[in-house]
Image: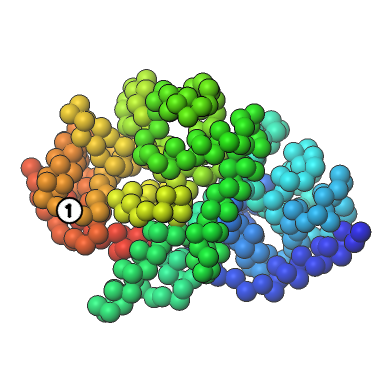
Amino acid sequence: MENVEDVLKEWGNVAASKPLKNREFDINKTITESNNRVVSITGIRRAGKSSVLMLIYQKLAALGKKVAYANLEDNRLQISDALDNILKQTPNTEWLLLDEVTTAKEWENWIHRINEMKSVHLITTSSLNKLSRSPPKALRGRISYFELFPLSFVEFLEFKNIKRPETTREIGVVERELEQYLTYGGFPEVVLSENKVGIIQEYMNSIIALDVAALSSVPLRVVSDFSAQLIGTTLFSATKLENVMKSIGHRIGKSTLLELEQLFETAYLAFFVPVFSTKIKDEALYPRKVYLGDTGFIYAARGKKNYGRMYENAVFLQLRRKLLPLEQISYHRSAGNLEVDFVMRQGTEVRKLIQVVYTLEEETKKRELRALVEAATEFGLNGKKGELLVITKDYEAHEEIEGKKISYKKLWKWLIDEGR
């Protein structure tokens, strides 16, 4: 077996020389944060966390810092004392970058010890964020988390060397690329590959098996059927889903379904958005809206292009990428059962209402605007105080309805504006 020193040299050479695309990720903030705290970069599998860690390596090396990098999934490092051996072989290292650190044996105690000793700046990655899901007590409050998602639309265009459009022809190119982005999503490998659906399906199966089923007592078949049900619906209700699962032969209770909900979100495979209410009971009782960790999952699983759902999912993921501290995403449902897709708020203060509509046919427009105006009235927004926005395929305008100033924006333009 190769010694740890040789393995570290090999990984260091890979990290230093690998050509990489820049991401919408604050590398400088990550480095600064690691001066005082353990940093964990987390996100869905294959979103590019290893590449970001290598970009951090290259940045630190360019600054003249002493830095070491290792991927703990390397079978040559699957030994009981791998982390201590890495530390021994890097006595002068200022920054230690460990990819998939939670696959190493006894990683919890080791990180705790390193954090107490302050002997090296530590930046780690983990596909399933075990550090945030169940961190050692001594580390709670001492870890800073940075999330990485699949490519935003801006990153997607940059990966394909397509600039922000200015001419009519360039706009046409971007509109066609938007359809590709919505259909196949933003995983870097998928974007650059011809076998897009096959790779997406492989990713889904890996996440379901390794990041959900393996960490629960629920059989893989049940987890897979749960996943299929989520992809086929826009609302999650444990009560209704319990009945559906029983109808296909799975006798599982609400507590198991709620456990799976949590695991799916921890693995970034799906997100569950609550209804907005000042009453905690309402948030618990109302169904939660389901959004997937990548728009490509929708087409890969069903083989059909559901543009309404793909549009809304793409907007959610962009909002989630840019979520501010203490900011929350909810949806709103009125007493008359009218719905606003996204309520952006801090605490109970609503700052933005967003409707997502693929095509604005007359009846659809009336319904969506009625819901938006009704919610705006309830929250005291008028378009000057708080943004009122409708995101659609091909309509841009500003309208005033019942004293409410409403903006319409094309999805491709909104994604580009929000992604910069």
- Neighbour tally class for label 1: few under 14, some 14-19, many 20 plus, Cα within 10 Å: some
Rendered residue at 29%/59% (across/down): 411
**Residue bearing the label numbered 1:** 360
Quarter of the rendering containing residue 137 = top right
The residue lying toward the viewer, choosing from 226 and 179, is: 226
Q: Is residue 303 visible?
A: yes
Up-down: is 318 above or below 52?
Answer: above
Side (left or right) of 354 relative to 162: left
Image position, residue 247 (x, y; %): 45, 26
Side (left or right) of 272 relative to 402: right
Side (left or right) of 266 relative to 397: right
The residue lying toward the viewer, choosing from 127 and 16, is: 127
The residue lying toward the viewer, choosing from 163 and 312, is: 312
Which residue type carries mark 1?
Answer: Leu
Rendered residue at 62%/63% (across/down): 51
Helix, strand or loop at mark 1: loop
Image position, residue 373 (x, y; %): 15, 40
- State which quarter of the image contains the N terminus: bottom right
- State which quarter of the image contains the C terminus: bottom left
Q: Is residue 373 visible?
A: no
Image position, residue 184 (x, y; %): 44, 60
Query: Total of numbered circles in the picture?
Result: 1
Rendered residue at 80%/67% (across/down): 10
Image position, residue 307 (x, y; %): 31, 54
Rendered residue at 14%/57% (across/down): 398
